Image (cartoon, rainbow, N blue to C red):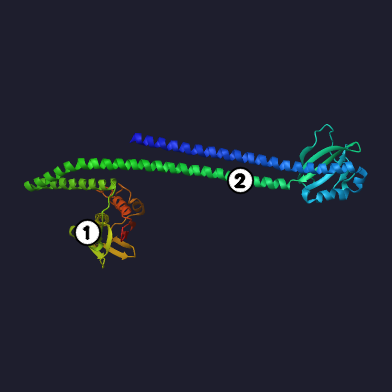
Amino acid sequence: MGIKRLTLKFESIRSMAILWSIIIFSITILLISAYFSYKNSKIAAEDALKMQAMGIAVTLQSFFQSESLKNLQENNRDFLMDIILNENWENVAFIALYDKKGYIVLHSNPDLIGKKIENFSPDLNQKYPYFHYLILSTFEKVFVADFNFYIDKKPYFLRIALHIYPAEVILKRTRLYIFLKIAGVIGLVVFGILGTILLKKFEDIQIKIKELKSLALMTKILAHEIRNPLSSIKGFSQYLFKKIDEEKIKKCLQIIYNEALRIERLTDELLLYGNPVKLEISKFNFKELIEELILGFKEKYPEIIFQIQISDDLWIQSDKDKLKEIVSNLLQNSVDALMETSKKEKRIVLEVEKTKNLIKFGIIDNGAGMDEKTLAKAMEPFFTTKVWGSGLGLAIVKKLCDVLKIKIQIKSKKEEGTRVYLWIPKSL
C-alpha cells in the first residue's frame, strides 16, 4: 500500500510540474508580448509625431525660401494660423521661429513676437532635428521638434510643438491590450491553483479508491477466515447446550453463541460496507414489505407500539432486499433508542406520503434522540454511541440509499425522539 501511495504521489507531482511548466511558459510569453507591444506602440506613436513635425517643417522651409522674413512677419497671423487650423495638422500646439539669441521672430501667437525665451541657448553644433518633450505654462505636456536652417543667410531655429493626444489614444489602446494580457496571466495563475487543487483531490480520490479496494479484499479474506471457526463455535455451543443440564454452563454456552452471532453479523456488515453493491431490480408491494418487517419486530419487542399508517398497496420497482436492509437498520436504531429510555409508552410510527414519482416514507420514534454533535456524525462509518455497536449501521444505510437513488433525512432532538424520512423512487 505504501508503494502504491508513493507511485500515486509521484504521478501527481509530475502532473503538477507539467501543468505549472505550461502555465509559467504561457505567462512568460504573455508578459514578453505585453512589454514589446507597449514598447513598439510607444515608438510608433513618437514616430507618427516626428513624421508630422517633419512634414510641417518641410512645408515651412519652402515658404521661408520663397518669402522674405519681413513679408512673413507681416503675414504671420494668417500664415501660421492656416497651418494650425489645417485639419491634417489639428494637433499642433504652437509654431515658433527663434533667432540665435533666443528672440521670437515668428510665432503662431503674434503677441509673443519679439520676446526672448528664457533658458534658451541654441547650440549650432546640436544635431537637428532634435525631438523632446516640454511642459507648457498650462501644465500640458507637448512633443517638441526643433529644426535649424538659414533665412537670408542667417541661422534660425524652428520649434514645432504638437499635442500628444493622438499618441495617448494609441498608448491607451495598447494599455488596454496589456491589461487584457495581465488579466490572462491572472487567469492562468488562478487556473493553475484550481488545477493543483483538483489534482490533489484526484490524488486523494485515487488513494481512497485503492484503500477501498484493499478494504474490500481484506474483508473478503477476513470473512472467509472468520466464518469457518465461527460455524464450529456456534455448532458446538448449540450441541453442548442441548447435552449439558447444568444451568451455569448453559449460560456460558449461551453467551458464547450470542457473541459468535454478533461477530458473524459484524462480518456481514463489513462485507456489505466494503464491497460494491450489486442490484437485483424487481417489482414488489412496499406495504407488504413493511408489514413483514414489523411482524418480526413486534414478536421480538412486544413492549413497543408499532403504528403503520399505510392504507394503500404501493407497488415499486427497486431492489427489495436492499430496501429491506435499509428499513430494517433504521427500525433497529429506533428500537435501540426506545430501549434506552424509561418512558412508559414506547412508540414507533411508520407513515407514507405519495407523490407522482416518489414515496416519502417516515419512521418516527419517541426514543432517546440525539444531540446536534451526534446527529452530525451519525452516518460516519465506525461512529457509534452504543456499547456493542459496530458503527456501520447508518453508514450502510447511506451507502444503500445512494445506490437506490433514495434521499435520506434525519431529524432528532435529545429526549424528544428521532424522525427519519426516505424519498424512494417508485421506479429505479
Query: From the image, which quarter does the C terminus lie in?
Result: bottom left
Q: Which residue is outermost to the bottom?
A: 311
Please name the amino acid that badge 1 sits on: Leu
Residue 228 image point, x, y percent: 17, 42
Would you identify the image quadrant in which residue 297 lies?
bottom left
Q: Which residue is outermost to the top?
A: 125
Q: Nearer the viewer, mark 1 or mark 2?
A: 2
Residue 342 against residue 228 in the figure, above or below: below
Which residue is drawn at the image coordinates 50% and 44% (left, top)? 191
Depth check, front residue: 416 or 34:
34
Which residue is drawn at the image coordinates 34% and 65% (left, top)? 356
Residue 92 image point, x, y percent: 79, 47
Q: Which mark is residue 293?
A: 1
Please name the amino acid that badge 2 sits on: Phe
Q: Is residue 90 visible?
A: no
Depth check, front residue: 291 or 145:
145
Q: Which residue is outermost to the right?
A: 70
Which residue is drawn at the image coordinates 90% and 49% (left, top)? 75
Residue 306 image point, x, y percent: 23, 63
- Disc 2 designates what residue? 179
Q: Is residue 45 visible?
A: yes
Residue 2 against residue 82 in the figure, above or below: above
Depth check, front residue: 273 or 390:
273
The Cα–Cα distance between marks 1 and 2, rounded to whole angstroms, is 69 Å
Depth check, front residue: 116 or 372:
116
Would you identify the image quadrant in which residue 155 lies?
top right
